[in-house]
Image (spheres, rainbow, N blue to C red):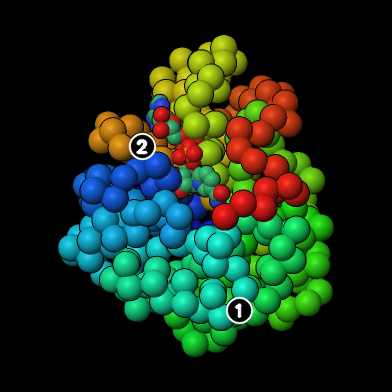
Amino acid sequence: SKVPPIILNNGVEMPQLGFGVWQVPDDEAERAVATALEAGYRSIDTAAIYGNEEGTGKALNSSGVAREDLFVTTKLWNADQGYDATLRAFDASLDKLGLDYVDLYLIHWPMPAKALYTDTYKAFEKLHADGRAKSIGVSNFLPEHLERLIDATSVIPAVNQIELHPHLQQHAAREFHAEQGIATEAWSPLGQGKGLLEVPAVVAIAQKHGRTPAQIVLRWHLQLGNVVIPKSVTPSRIEENIDVFGFALDTEDIAAISALNEDRRLGPDPASFNQG
Ligand code: NAD
């Protein structure tokens, strides 16, 4: 495979780079995911709330890629938290995807005000025990939510998928995950393509390596050990974003990008996001 794996805390291999499909309409998802699979992606990141599990599933099932070579992630939406609702929502997701298991199932947001994430995760543990979710984890959990979850449940999350890019480097979260054996997966790894890819320091490093700014930012993540799931519907960019294993940033490049941290979120604050 083009993409080397990381080993999760349960021994499962996860490609370190995958394809994200947020904001890809269902009727475009099939083509985008098919393009990604042709380009060599094997890990696909969707979610119930993205409304494109069907299109994504069609591409997966008609790709000719063996199921065991795919790594499919989906996420439980906020409105479906709670033990029984989670089991029902999982069945609906599998049905839409046309699969009989997912590789990774994530709680999309902690929604601390609802205080349901522990019950929700207990349903995840059942899905995991039944072999229908090969790995289970969370998304947008702050260290305090992870601590509470780990205290109350038995399976340490394999992954926490959080907003992470050079303008929001998440040092405390990454350190906490490393201590707990939780893989850090970066959402919006390119900062949603807004501004970050025009930052002079990034552009200069791109010129130095004869690469694009997107490739430089993805390389920065990979060399830090993050899992990344860049999104694009443009075939040339889909190819460009996976073509990041034939060069390396040096320590100076890494330092220059690491100097761009602003602790600035593009998305909601998980401590107060309780919608859905
Ligand atoms: P991203 O950082 O991957 O940026 C995507 C955008 O960057 C594209 O729409 C395009 O405008 C631009 N872009 C992509 N490749 C480019 C290239 N090579 N050159 C120039 N511009 C390029 O943003 P994202 O889609 O927000 O995040 C990626 C994935 O993360 C999502 O698709 C989704 O799967 C996941 N995600 C998860 C959550 C969560 O709450 N768990 C939230 C947001 C996103």
Question: Which residue is located at x 26 percent, y 56 percent?
Answer: 55
| Circle 2 residues within 10 Å: few <14, some 14–19, many ≥20 | many
Q: Secondary structure at mark 1?
A: helix
Residue 269 placement (x, y as % from top left): 70, 42
Q: Which comes sooner in the sequence, label 1 or label 2? A: 1
Give the image quarter of residue 109.
Answer: bottom right
Query: Where, quadrant-wise, is the C terminus in this rendering?
Result: bottom right
Give the image quarter of residue 160.
Answer: bottom right
Question: Which residue is located at x 51 percent, y 23 percent?
Answer: 194
Residue 4 visible in image:
no
Left or right side of 150 for 231: left
Give the image quarter of residue 101.
Answer: bottom left
Question: Which residue is located at x 54 percent, y 67 percent?
Answer: 80
Residue type marked 2? Ser
Q: Which residue is mark 2?
A: 232
Residue 72 placement (x, y as % from top left): 40, 63
Residue 135 placement (x, y as % from top left): 53, 72
The nearer-to-camera label among 1 and 2 is 1
Furthest residue toward bottom: 130
Mark 1 sits near ligand 1, with its Cβ under 8 Å away? no
- CA distance for labels 1 and 2: 34 Å
Q: Which residue is mark 1?
A: 83
Mark 2 sits near ligand 1, with its Cβ under 8 Å away? yes
